[in-house]
Image: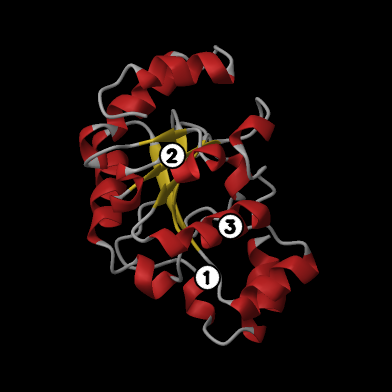
Amino acid sequence: MKDRLFKDILPRVAKPARYAGGELNMIRKDWEQSQVKMVFAFPDVYEIGMSHLGGKILYGLVNEKSEHLMERAFAPWPDMEALMREEGIPLYSLESFAPLNSFDVVGFSLQYELSITNVLNMLDLSAIPLRARERQESDPLVIAGGPVVFNPEPFAEFFDAFFIGDGEEQLLEFLDCLEQNRYLDRKSRLIKAAAIPGIY
């Protein structure tokens, strides 16, 4: 997919650097050796998402302090979205160009209420069912944190779990819990994770 993107798709969008990855200090971990694979999905364009300090903290925490993997994805601008839909290209991470639905966890940072529509659009672009009740065992767990989720109920049907409070205090424990219970079914893993303080 990467070769196709660089050859056929990115030359046709206004700001291709948003979708190309390869930045200084980007962390690439071994996909096969990593325990739990998570993508940090920011529901806005690259420039806004990369200015978010919380995302940088979580990215460093997971990739430098654990055997888990965290990559990044951002909402595409309409020109890129149109091409992705036209060409059948799923939303992907900037590190490995893996589709979001191939990760174990897709984590969104909700900084403002209106970003929820971008979340739904990103899930749709990733071929991940929008509602938690519709997701199967093969689908990633969809989680969220950030200021908006201090009142999570208005968005609860779209997410499997919420992080109430600072995510860096809970994220590694959450990923460790998923790894330790990876042989359980989806519901049982979520019940185990719900025992972690701050996980809703």
The residue indicated by pointer 3 is 122
Q: Earlier in the sequence, mark 3 or mark 1?
A: 1
Return the residue nearer the eye: 54 or 87.
54
Q: Are marks 2 and 3 in contact (CB under 8 Å)?
A: no
Q: How is the image coloured?
A: secondary structure
Q: Real-space Cα distance between discs 3 and 1?
A: 14 Å
- The spot of residue 157 in percent (x, y) is 55, 38
Image quadrant containing the N terminus = bottom right
The residue indicated by pointer 2 is 153
Residue type at mark 2: give it: Glu
Image quadrant containing the C terminus = top left
Q: Quadrant of residue 67?
A: top left
Residue 64 in the figure: left or right of residue 133:
left
Residue type at mark 1: give it: Tyr
- The spot of residue 46 in percent (x, y) is 43, 70
User: Which residue does the image show at 20% across and 34% down from the upper left?
Assistant: 169
User: Which residue does the image show at 57% across and 87% down from the upper left?
Assistant: 14
User: Which residue does the image show at 56% across and 76% down from the upper left?
Assistant: 77
| Label of residue 19 in the image | 1
Q: Real-space Cα distance between discs 2 and 1?
A: 32 Å
- The spot of residue 114 in percent (x, y) is 45, 64
Residue 6 in the figure: left or right of residue 165:
right
Residue 135 visible in the snapshot: no
Of the residues tagged 3 and 1, which is closer to the observer? 3
Categorize mark 1 by other alpha carbons within 10 Å: few (<14), some (14-19), many (20+): many
Residue type at mark 3: give it: Met
Q: Secondary structure at mark 2?
A: helix
